[in-house]
Image (cartoon, rainbow, N blue to C red):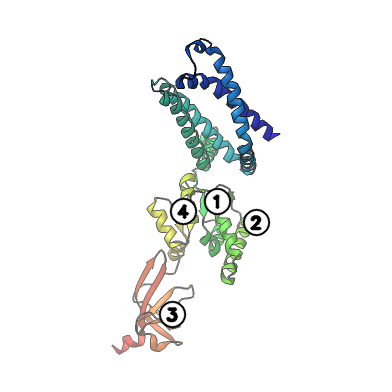
Amino acid sequence: MLKRFVQLFILVTGGTIGFLYFPAFVNAVELLDGSFIDRMYIAPYVGLVLGALILYLLSFWFVDHIVEFIQWFEEVLMKAPLTNLFFGGFGLIFGLVIAYFISQPIQDFDVLVISQVGPLFVTALLGYLGFQVGFRRRDEFLFLIQRKDKDQKTDNKDEENKKPSVKPKLLDTSVIIDGRIADICQTAFLEGTLIIPMFVLEELQHIADSSDALKRNRGRRGLDVLNRLQKEIDVDVEMYDGDFEEIQEVDSKLVKLAKVMDGIVVTNDFNLNKVCEFQNVPVLNINDLANAVKPVVLPGEELVVQVIKDGKEQNQGVAYLDDGTMIVVEEGRNYIHQTIDVLITSVLQTSAGRMIFAKPKALEKVQ
């Protein structure tokens, strides 16, 4: 049925082309003498028959390819999400409307090629651009619509019932695997809705399916944390199904989504923290919070530590506090596997963590 319809369309197209342009073609090549020119009224009908016949015969060579293309395009449309079709179609219509108004002045040109080909080119170009803009920026349009609806509902409420808006918190993969976000939410220190983007969940599932045992355990731990957030903790968790297909990196998608939603990125990734700060995106770093609530250790204080291993520099030893904070012990290599008293000399605190520098108290007494 589709093949017959395509052949009928080609037949009508060929007849139309012949009807419109065959008389001009005959006149241009001077195939007619003066006596026949007087009967030029028959030329359009001759062109109609010839054009329809020629294109119909040629259609047997390429009609199958046209039918296959239409069927492939139909499958693509059937599989595409409804939001993609809606915003892509809306952009296409908007582009064609603009092309219509632009094409009107072009048709008034005296040059035949410009007046006829120009409008077709403008229509095709703006239609394509309109579809691409609507399709690729559908997530932003959808969010603006949802946000407008929420704002209208908020405006209808009394001023007394209005509460200060709390920005949504977007979780990245590292902070979910870390797990401390669940404990923070349980203590009610984190306000607002937690947003779990679908592309973050897909990365988490990919890690959980890894052939590497360490990665697989980390991924499964992240999935367990998400289940705990949804089922055991009184916190609002929402999934975000949108995606930014033109962006490959998950962290870049998260930063883009934070800009679109006017949200806050929650992470413990040092590099992502810096990227957010560079792009003026609000960010909450779990490591910064952990460092803020650690017991204060000041230079001059004494600690009892066990030197575990060698340091990077010569004669250095490395020890750890109960919370995992690393202590670099100068001249501590000779005390490996021993518990000693050390004297704090300096403390270095960054978003990546905290380092404490110390020296054995025994050496201080000798000096």
Residue named by callout 2: 231
Q: What kind of residue is marked 1?
A: Ile
Spatial CA distance of label 1 from label 4 is 16 Å
User: Can residue 158 be seen from the camera position used here?
Assistant: no
For residue 103, above or below residue 247: above
Q: What kind of residue is marked 4?
A: Ser
Nearer mark to the viewer, of 3 and 4 = 4
| Label 2: element kind | helix
Closer to the chain start, of discs 3 and 1, is 1
Nearer mark to the viewer, of 1 and 4 = 4
Name the foreground residue: 269 vs 155.
269
| Labelled pair 3, 2 in contact (Cβ < 8 Å) | no
Residue named by callout 1: 195
Residue 181 lies left or right of residue 9; in this view the side is left
Name the foreground residue: 57 vs 94.
57
Closer to the chain start, of discs 2 and 1, is 1
Dot 3: few (<14), some (14–19), or many (≥20) neighbours within 10 Å? Answer: many
| Label 3: element kind | strand
Q: How many marks?
A: 4
| Label 1: element kind | strand
Name the foreground residue: 16 vs 194.
16
For residue 147, above or below residue 17: below
Query: In the rendering, at what x and y percent does residue 218 appear?
Result: 57, 67
| Label 4: element kind | helix
Q: What kind of residue is marked 2?
A: Lys
Residue named by callout 4: 252
